[in-house]
Amino acid sequence: MEIGADLAANTNQQNNSRRSGNFPPTLWGCSFASFSFPQTEFESYSRQVEELKENVKGMLIKSKEDPVQNIEFINLLCRLGVSYHFDNEIENNLREIFDDLPNLLEKHDYDLYTLSLLFRVLRQHGFKMPSGECILR
């Protein structure tokens, strides 16, 4: 019992000897703690987001005409961090590109940037891209 009492007394002495920071009051006050966002404004923003998502989906479908433009657009969506909104469309587009890859590489003489972008985007989305000379032929 004595050990417990000594420990409690020692802890009280440590707590009493702690100095205060004496920080000045915050300039911001408590306005963020009581922040409320009007529901009508939230609904308005939600509608705008849905409209923008539809516009981007249309752009993604339109970029399907040119495989290089499509890959660049998909890369842009990934880098902006909004690709999760269009996972199904991106997956379908990449599957079509991957399935037609031998024909694409045979018909077109792509530069190194385009080939590396194609390689990286397809690999990032789980497609087994060959590396080495077989892709450059």
Image: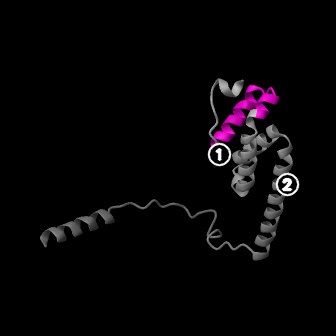
Q: Quadrant of residue 86?
A: bottom right
- The residue that disc 1 covers is 125
Name the residue: 74% across, 36% down: 101
State the count of labels.
2
Name the residue: 72% across, 36% down: 118
Residue 41, image x and y in percent? 79, 71
Q: Quadrant of residue 17?
A: bottom left
Q: Main secondary structure of the magenta part?
A: helix
- The residue that disc 2 covers is 58
Determine whether label 2 and label 1 are within 8 Å by CB: no
Give the residue type at disc 2. Gly
Magenta extent: 103-126
The figure's colour scheme reads one colour
On screen, residue 112 above or below 30? above
Q: Is residue 63 magenta?
A: no
Measure the alpha-carbon separation of dots 2 and 1.
Answer: 21 Å
Give the residue type at disc 1. His
Residue 69, image x and y in percent? 82, 40
Q: Nearer the viewer, residue 82 or 44?
A: 82
Of the 4 image quadrants, the one containing the C terminus is top right
Residue 13, image x and y in percent? 27, 65
Sequence order check: which comes first, mark 2 or mark 1?
2
On screen, residue 62 above or below 100? below
